[in-house]
Amino acid sequence: MGNKREEKEEKKEEKEKEKTLLQELCGGDAELYDFLRDYLYFNPLAAISQKDLGILTEEAEKSGNFRPAVDKAIFEASQNPGERESYIKAIQNLASKAIQATEQEKGKLEKEGLTDRAARLGRRIESQKVMSERVEDIIDVASKFYNEKLVELGEDVRREERREEKKEAERQEMRTGDLEKAGREARKKERRKMGREEKSEAEKQDKREEMAAEEAKEARTEKKEEAEREEIRIGDLEKAGREARREERKGN
């Protein structure tokens, strides 16, 4: 139950971060914000198709669903500033074809008397017109948005790797503790069969081994504490990086 609650909170926090960043980038431009909040993704690497844009465009022309191709084009435009003009043309071309397909579908629904569904398509057409008319603004904001998200995703991946390393160290610590305990129990049983002199030597050996085990445990504890200090340091650096990038965006 606790894990599900934590996951819900994390997703809520991600949505808030996404919303805040997009609002920051759009400023008071409500039209641009309303469009992009439906077209940008917190994790573009997971949400956007891996297929080539050309293939997605061909599929869209057959199916009438241009959204996967549009998502791909906006993301690629954000990551390839040197090819900006070709992506502007590609997005405008997709918008034009999407408008045409949506208008045809809207006309059919109106003839069938399905006015509510036709009205929804009318709103979609208006959104597609915004995409065509404001493609340069869309690419500008998408570039800043996705660049920030990709940095954060890299941080998340590395954070998860460190978390797994910590869990593995804890599991190893438990295994080591279990082995040491089992060793002590086994030696105790053996000493019961020994003579006085042999038992005395065995007890000395046990003390030496226990001291060595304690030293090893202290070393592991120090390593764990150092890892925790490093995690705090990395967190501070990541926070400082976010703040620096925010200031840089303001300057631009």
Image (cartoon, grey):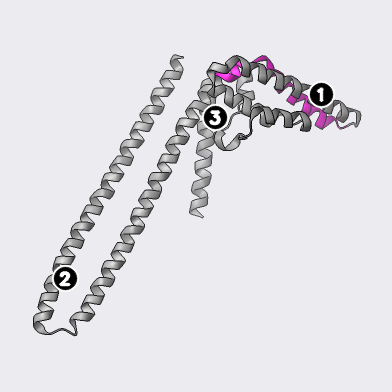
State the residue position of label 1.
103
Magenta span: chief secondary structure: helix
Position of 179 compared to 196: left or right?
A: right
Q: First in sequence: mark 1 or mark 2?
A: 1
Q: Where is residue 138 in the image (x, y as percent from the top left)?
A: 60, 19
The answer to whether residue 68 is seen in the rendering is yes
Mark 3 or mark 1: whose residue is earlier in sequence: 3
The residue most toward the left is 197
Q: Tell me which residue sits at (39%, 25%) in the image.
A: 243
Q: How far apart are marks 3 and 1 (CA)?
A: 31 Å
Indicate yes or no whether the magenta region holds residue 129.
yes
Q: Which of marks 3 and 2 is nearer the N terminus?
A: 3
The crowd level at tag 3 (other Cα within 10 Å; few <14, some 14-19, many 20+) is some
Query: Is 204 or 126 nearer to us in this picture?
Result: 204
Residue 224 horizontal/vertical position (percent) = 28, 49
Relative to 202, is 70 on the left or the right? right
Q: Which amino acid type is shown beneath numbered disc 1?
A: Glu
User: Residue 215 placed where, x, y %?
Assistant: 18, 57
What SS does tag 1 mark? helix
CA distance for labels 1 and 2: 85 Å
Closest to the camera, between mark 3 and mark 1, is: 1
Q: Which residue, given by chain and number where applicable, does mark 2 sit on?
A: 206
Circle 1 or circle 2, nearest the eye: 2
Q: Is residue 236 or residue 164 the one in the foreground?
A: 164
Please state the extent of the stretch shown in magenta in the rendering.
Answer: 114-140
Residue placed at 45% from the left, 31% from the top? 151
Q: Mark 3 points at which residue?
A: 19
In x, y percent, where is residue 110?
88, 28
